[in-house]
Amino acid sequence: MELHILEHSLKVASIAKEGIQICTHGLIKLAFLPSKTRCKFFSLTETPEDYTIIVDEDGFKELPQSEYLSVAEATWLALNVVSGGGSATSSQPIGVTKIAKSVIAPLADHNISVFMLSTYQTDFILVRERDLPMVMHTLSSEFTLLRVVNGETVAANSTGVTNGFVKPKLVPRPIIHPLSSPSNMFCVTSLDPDTLPSVATLLMDVMFYSGGVKDSGASGDDSGHIRFFSFSLIEGYISLVMDEQTTRRFPNNVLFTSASGELWKMVRIGGQPLGFDECGIVAQISEPLATADIPAYYISTFKFDHALVPEENIQSVIGALRTNESAGH
Amino acid sequence: MSGSKPDILWSPHHVDRYVICDSELSLYRIGSIGSAEPKAGTLPLSQETAATLLAINSDTPYMKCVAWYPKHEPECLLAVGQANGRVVLTSLGQSPNSKCKELMGREFVPKHARQCNTLAWNPWDSNWLAAGLDKHRADFSVLIWDISSKYAPDIAVPMEKIRLSSAGDTDSGLVVTKPLYELGQNDACLSLCWLPRDQKLLLAGMHRNLAIFDLRNTSQKTFVNTKAIQGVTVDPHFHERVASFFEGQVAIWDLRKFEKPVLTLTEQPKPLTKVAWCPTRTGLLATLTRDSNVVRLYDMQHAPTPIGDETEPTIIERSVQPCSDNSVISSFAWHPSAQNRMVVVSPNRAMTDFTVFERISLAWGSTTSLMWACGRHLYECAEGEGAAEKDRDIATKMRQRAQNGYGHDTVQVWRNHLLAGDLEQKQQGPKQSLIYSGIKNIVKSSSGTTENRRCWRGSDRQTDVARYQSEERSLALRLCGWIGRGPEVDVEPFLKSLELEGEWERAAAVALFNLDIRRAIQILNKGASSEKGDLNLNVVAMALSGYTDEKKSLWREMCSTLRLQLKKPYLCVMFAFLTSEPGAYDGVLYESSVAVRDRVAFACMFLNDSQLPRYIDKLTNEMKEAGNLEGILLTGLTKDGVDLMESYVDRTGDVQTASFCVLMGSPGDVVKDTRVQCWIENYRNLLDAWRFWHKRAEFDIHRSKLDPSSKPLAQASDHT
């Protein structure tokens, strides 16, 4: 297996809901006018609390400085697992499940904090730039490490420095944050970049004017319903995560749907904002899922984490996680 | 393509059909304008050709790429790759036959929807259709579909998961979800082409590498990391050569050395949109960049991929602008069989039929013929047989002269040599070298000039004409051929020889310049009475006999005006001489139709020591500029002479004369002049080119005799 260390230097930021209007100019440019910026990595996720932005340095320049904008202090690098092509194994687990044991758990063991972004196309594991030597040391036994430089993939040499690195503590990982599962179901989808202009106004409406939609929505008074929408444009690929109701607003045939048309339920992690320093949260969730071979997407935001699991598996997922939770107590 | 810029696709088998695809598919037939009456709906593509729209198909929205069925039948079966990754079979024109009917409407659906970037139909097993898709997580990006496969529900997928039964899929007999091969897991595929080496080899431009998939063993792939992964295409004439591109740069690969590009072409400022090898011409690659009005061509014909050689092969790059109105080109397609022909389409669907002109290469033959090559044609242009002798090309003339032994027998120019010959033996010392140095140098060294006034011969009248004499002037007169050896200035032998040659006017003029009017009149009479003689000469003689030195006479007045109407230059100068003021003989000296040697001889007799060198200098420069060989008399075979010869060669190309002159005439340094050596070598090469081996050998022998410094040529040794 290959682990690609991508060349984007990323910033993770939060925009308060009440301050979104001062940022819309930059966000629209980043989302819909890629030819007007040099940005290659942009993701926007709306949660009930805020908007989380993940953007590379070129894109970050498009955002204004404001009291509504909080930026996580570190610079982040995105890692991407590429399995060796050619092998025609039939059913592959999807998302974080696939990399839970090979990437997420070892990093947690070494106290490396990760920030996850699953998209329609792939999973990005964000680590702090300063943690990179440790990351490479940790993963070099399992992966061929490759670094992307000017678009070309070249071998990345592990620094070989092991002195001073703490020994991993191989202890069980109980789930320590409260979990909740909203009632709505989600689609992970994409669309042809050429058709983006035709749905741009609709997307803008979904992104920035969600308050109005909730009233007209069918499940407006559903207390378990959560507002969650994610858009990303990364290296030319668009990925969308939205609930089923929102997908119905799009014209036929614009959104990509898989042949089996899966829907996903969300597991939301955290009661208090999680912060960026705590390690092992992703591992706590993904390891039990991997053991049960349940596919999952995972999207971290500024305050909370979100896992998406197939709707038919939600009960067993909750069950499995509760078991782990109680084990911790 | 969906609503964007039109692309163009040529039918692989029907050379008059092509398809324009943008939001719909339009089938056109191309034909010559002359053959069909201009019908409505016919679009002119060039002055000779026009296209007729045969059919439109707008059944397949969200088109991303199109591939034409590679076999002859069914004729217009197309595969369309859509934005959601589905591949749909459709057809155009003609009521489809049964096989086509069965295939039409068939859909091939990947597990996860994402854009279909490229399609490639296997040219051998036309049931195999490869589709390249965008990345989707752990899914495969290269799917090879069997278009003839029957629909079979995928048992691996639990029935409850097959939920997405949108309206189009209800007729599920047409939907295929199980590909024959799945390749490129966890990757994206941007471009595809089957390799001619084996029908199971597929070259794919993946996200960050070029990969060769071998379907005989799908667990293995050969790959090379590169950014140039778009538009992979195999050279139809050289199956190991592949082109691919990234943004503005084209990379050329050799599959036998699949590590790095064998060469990269000059980067263009705008991103490329299409790269295609010319099917009718080896090593010609056409490229198109976005928003451009030119197609750029790279000629690699003479660059057959140097393996293991670090030097970049030479590529000839040029641009063609197919649209006369400068409009932007959206796409282009080479004609499958017509030489260097392509049709280009602009964003508004305007089409132009265009043939790329081959570069013309041109070469002169060693005789007068000129050859040029253009494409597969060779043209020759040769001198017509009927050309008049004097209009013939210098090469023809030189060749004829060489055949006739020119240069080996003495001719005019080196009479100098002979005339001076005796003197050379007698006289030693500084004067000797003067003989070859030309009259210009001879008169410069003149000293001890005596001036005398003589009577008209046969008359006692004193002339007021001053004549000058010195040893050097006599030598000059001898070199001009007027007088023979000896101290006496006696032109009689010269006059006799002129009479023999029938040069009456010239002889009369020489006699007159020697102050012998009677002799002049006698010569003119003789000329008038000779065979084919000109009776007008008698009239001239009559006029001459009336000569008077009275300044204000009617004779003088009439002669000085009417002489200008005389056609014959020598007659004209005779009267000019008689009507001139003493010492002012411009009418004689600058009459360019009079032979240089006669004018020089005249000058040596009648110009004083200050006038003479001035005149000679002026005349010399004139001769040098004009490259007039008569001027050799003045320059001698000195550096001046070589200068003169140079302008002669520049004007005529006659290296033959130049070579002989310089060799014959000159000892010493002049031959070492690089120009001289160049003429000689060129002349030898010419003789060789004409296969005049013997003439060349004769020339070499001749040369070694005359120029001892020339290296003896190595003898071809005979080992028999």
Image (cartoon, coloured by chain):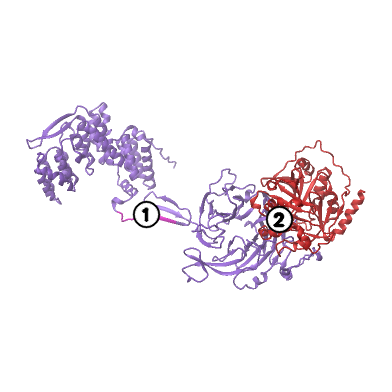
What hue represents chain A? red
Query: Which image quarter is the C terminus of chain B in?
Result: top left
**Chain ID at mark 2:** A
Give the percent coordinates (x, y) of residue B90. Answer: 64, 68
Tell me the kind of residue under disc 2: Ile
Give the percent coordinates (x, y) of residue A325. Answer: 90, 51
The chain displayed purple equals B
**Chain ID at mark 1:** B
Q: Nearer the viewer, residue A14 or A175?
A: A14
* Most common SS among magenta residues: loop
The stretch of residues the image draws in magenta is B378-387
- Could you tell me which secondary element the residue under label 1 belongs to? loop
Tell me if residue B381 is in the magenta stretch.
yes
- Could you tell me which secondary element the residue under label 2 belongs to? strand
Residue B659 visible in image = no
> In the visual, does A61 lie left or right of B659?
right
Query: Which image quarter is the N terminus of chain B in?
Result: bottom right
Tell me the kind of residue under disc 1: Ala
Name the residue furthest top: B429
> Residue A238: which numbered mark, if any?
2
Q: Nearer the viewer, residue A53 or B18?
A: A53
| Residue to which mark 1 is pinned | B382
Q: Which tag is nearer the camera, tag 1 or tag 2?
A: 2
